Amino acid sequence: MRVCIITEGSYPYVVGGVSSWIHNLIKAFSDVEFVLWEIVSDRHQEREFMYELPENLTEIYEVYLQDDDWDINGSKEEHKRLKKNEYEVLKSLMIGVETDWHGLFEMLHSSKYGIEELLMGEDFLHITREFYDREYSQIPFCDFLWTLRSIYMPLFQVIRSEIPKAEIYHCVATGYSGVLGSMAKYYHKGGLLLSEHGIYTREREEELIKANWVDNVYKKIWVDQFHKMSRLVYDEAESVVSLFPHARSLQVQIGCPKEKTLVIPNGIYVDRFQNLPDKRSEELGIVNIGAIVRVTPIKDIKTMIQAFYFASKKVPNLHLWVMGNTEEEPEYAKECFELVSVLGIENLVTFTGIVNVTEYLGRMDMTILTSISEGQPLTILESFAASKPVIATDVGDCRGLIYGNKIGDKEAGILTHVMNVEEISDAIVKLATNEELCKFMGQVGRKRVAKYHRIEEINDRYRDLYKEIYKNNGVNQSKRKLR
C-alpha cells in the first residue's frame, strides 16, 4: 500500500502538534510506504527537516503557492482565448454557485495555459468585470482586478503541480491540501481520506477578519474561495475525520455530508510519561509552570507572560518554563524576550527552545496553554499522562479535555477565556497555592488520557480506515459535477 500524505506548512519543516501526529503515524505503519506532498509558501524559503525521517517515507514532493511561473508585467505575446466551455469553467470558479472542479483540473493541470496567460488574459478580465459590475462597482476596478489575481494565483499554482501516484491520498487539512487530494483522486483514481486537526475554513476566516493586509471589502471573496475548496474535498473524500464532536458539527455546517464524518481523537504513548525525572534539588520549594508551545502569535505567549507576572506578585516562588521552538517567528520571540525583560522577571522565566518534554514534565507542578486557536492539543494530553493539571484557554477541544464530555466527569485543570490576563493569573495562583488540588486534577487527567487517548488504539482505527479505503479503491469514483 502506498499512501500520500498532503500537508500545508507543517511536517517535516515545522515542529508542532500536526507535525508530530504525521511523524508518529508514518512510524507506526512501518509496513506502509508513505510519500509526502507538502505545500510551502515559496520555492526560495529556507527549510530544514525538523524530524529524522522514517525509512518508509520514501519521497517528498513540494508545491509552491508563490513561484516565478508568471510575470506580473504581462507577456508581450498575444494571450490565447479560452474555448467556450473553458470560459464557463473559469466563470464557475469565480462567480458561480457551483465550481466545475474537474473542468478546472483539465484546463490548468494540462499546462495548456500558463498562469500568467490566464490571469493577464482577456477572458479573466471579462469575468472579473462581470463580477465587479454585479457587486463591487463602488470600489476602484484596478484594485479589484489585482485582488482577484492574487486570490487565484496560488490556487492555479497548486493545480499545475506534479501529482505523486498512490493508492490512498490522505489530506491533513482542507484548503489547498484538499484541492490537491481531490485532483489526485480525479487523475489517479486513488482513495481519499481527510483528517482535520482544526477546521481550516474557520481558521482562515478568523485570520482574514483580523488581517490588516486585506481590505474589508475583499475579505468575503477570500472566505468564499476557502469555503469552495473545503466543500470540494468534503464531497470527494470517502471519510472525513475530526478530533472531537464539536469539530465534526462544524464540518457538517460548512457542507460535509454527515454520513462521511467520524471522530478519531489524538493519541499519545501514555506509558512514555510514567516514572519521569522529578524536581532537581535546587527546585524544591519552587512551583514550576510548564508551557510546551511554539513561541508564535497564535499561542499568545505575551498574555501568558503578563498573567505569570501578576501571579508572581502574589506567589513569589513561581517559575515559568517555555519549552518550544523560538525560531519559527523570530520577531515575535524577540518581543516576548523583551517583555520578560521590561517586567523584570528574567530570573523567573526560562525559554528552553526545543526539548525532550519527558526530561521536563516530571519537574512541573502544572502546565499552561494560552492559545488563540487550537484543535486537540497534544501538550494537554502529554501533561495529563504525566499527571499534571492544565490551565488552558477555551479554544478547540480544551474544554472537553479539561472538563470531560460526560455528566459527572471531574475537572483536570482550569479553563479561561482567550487573552484574559486576570483569569489566567488567578488560575495560576489557585493551583500554585493548593498542592492537593493540583495532585487531584493531575490524577483526573491521567485517567482520562489513559482511557480515551492511547495512541495504540488510535492507530488501529486509522489502520482499519486505510484498509477499508484501499479495498474500495476505484469503486466509487464520482462522476458528478462538484461544488
Image: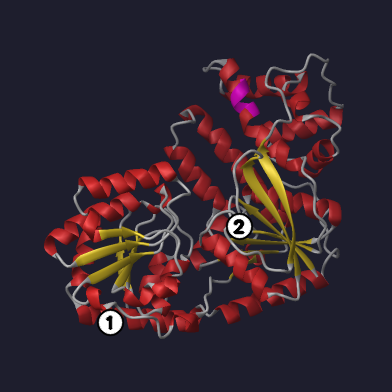
The residue range painted magenta reads 145-149
Work out whether 241 lies above or below 285.
Answer: above
Work out whether 1 lies above or below 447.
Answer: above
Q: In which quarter of the image is the N terminus?
A: bottom right
* Location of residue 355 in the rendering, given as x and y in whole percent from the top left corner: 44, 65
* Location of residue 267 in the rendering, given as x and y in whole percent from the top left corner: 53, 74
Predominant secondary structure in magenta? helix
Residue 432 on the magenta segment: no
Work out whether 412 lies above or below 51.
Answer: below
Disc 1, disc 2: CB below 8 Å?
A: no
Disc 1, SS: helix
**Please, what is the three-letter code of the amino acid marked with disc 1?**
Lys
**Please, what is the three-letter code of the amino acid marked with disc 2?**
Tyr
In-front residue for pair 9/169: 9
- Disc on res. 439: 1
Q: Residues within 10 Å of mark 2 (few under 14, many from 20)?
A: many
In-front residue for pair 25/154: 25
Residue 146 on the magenta segment: yes
Residue 122 is left or right of residue 379, and the answer is right
Q: Name the residue under label 2.
A: 11
Q: Residues within 10 Å of mark 1 (few under 14, many from 20)?
A: some
Work out whether 219 lies above or below 406.
Answer: above
* Location of residue 341 in the rendering, given as x and y in whole percent from the top left corner: 24, 47
In-front residue for pair 446/235: 446
Residue 392 is left or right of residue 164, and the answer is left
Q: Which of marks 1 and 2 is nearer the N terminus?
A: 2
Furthest-left residue in view? 314
Name the residue located 65 percent from the left edge and 80 percent from the top edge: 460
- Disc on res. 259: none
Colour option used:
secondary structure
Mark pair 1, 2: CA separation: 35 Å
